[in-house]
Image (spheres, grey):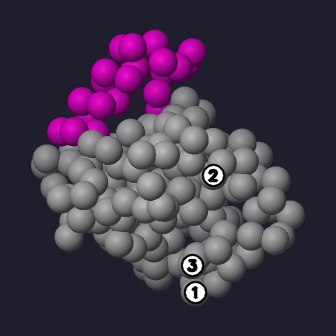
Amino acid sequence: METATFGNGCFWCTEAVFQELKGVEKVMSGYAGGHVENPTYKQVCSATTGHAEVLQITYDPQQINYQELLEVFWSTHDPTTPNRQGNDVGPQYRSIIFYHNEAQKQLAEKYKQELDASGAFDNPIVTKIEPLEKFYPAEGYHMNYFKTHGHEPYCSFVIRPKLDKFRKVFAGKLKSA
């Protein structure tokens, strides 16, 4: 198994996406990139700890590789808006890739350069690519959020449409495929 760590907005939204990919064994919501030890959700939301909401993804590289995870990462959020994804505003929602090794760093940088050069987005990509120093798991009530709270308005109006679009685009990569 290998590990990838991405910050691409609210972890409630992005967790639901990565959980459906074939080859992804585990998705854990958490925090990375800040200066406070063991931050809480409330602290991270105060925008004073420096952390981003992130996902730590454990995957089987025989079934899905890092490049494919990057494709999902880039396709499921807006990497051109600093500190914002939709209505979620603040540095905790920044677009960031925390690499675990040199190979991940090189792939992420190459993908970012190619995507930026392609003109796929109207504005420049602002996604940061940094080494993972420390990952802190989020509080338990954040885990499997969409699966356990899918009936709530936020899930219905924000997460479900994102998930439906993702399922159409990546149908061949889903566990149910």
Residue 142 position by quadrant:
bottom right
Give the extent of the magenta segment. 106-126
Residue bearing the label numbered 2: 163
Of the two numbered discs 2 and 1 in the rendering, the one whose residue sits closer to the viewer: 2
Kindly identify the amino acid type of the residue bearing the numbered disc 3: Met
Residue 43 point in image, percent of width and height: 63, 73
Image quarter (top left, top right, bottom left or bottom right) of the C terminus: bottom left
Mark 3 or 2: the one toward you: 2
Q: Position of residue 176 (x, y in %)?
A: 48, 61
> Would residue 102 appear left or right of 138 to someone viewing this image?
left
Disc nearer the start of the sequence (3/2): 3
How many numbered badges does the structure rendering display?
3
Amino acid type for the residue under numbered disc 1 = Gly
**Residue 4 spot, x, y in % from top left:** 31, 59
Residue farthest to the right, as pictured: 153
Q: Is residue 64 left or right of residue 160?
A: left
Identify the amino acid type marked 2.
Leu
Residue 47, horizontal then vertical, whole percent: 63, 60
Would residue 121 be counted in the magenta stretch? yes
Residue at image point 35% right, 72% down: 25
Please tell me which of labels 2 and 1 falls first in the chain: 1
**Which residue is label 1 attached to?**
140
Residue highlighted by disc 3: 143
Res 66 visible = yes
Residue at the outermost left position: 102
The part of the image, by quadrant, that contains residue 72 is: top left
Q: Verify CB contact (< 8 Å) between mark 3 and mark 2.
A: no
Q: Nearer the viewer, residue 20 or 86?
A: 20
Q: Residues within 10 Å of mark 2 (few under 14, many from 20)?
A: some
Label 1 crowd (10 A; few <14 / some 14-19 / many >=20): few
The residues bearing labels 1 and 3 have C-alpha atoms spaced at a distance of 6 Å
Q: CA distance from mark 2 to mark 1?
A: 22 Å
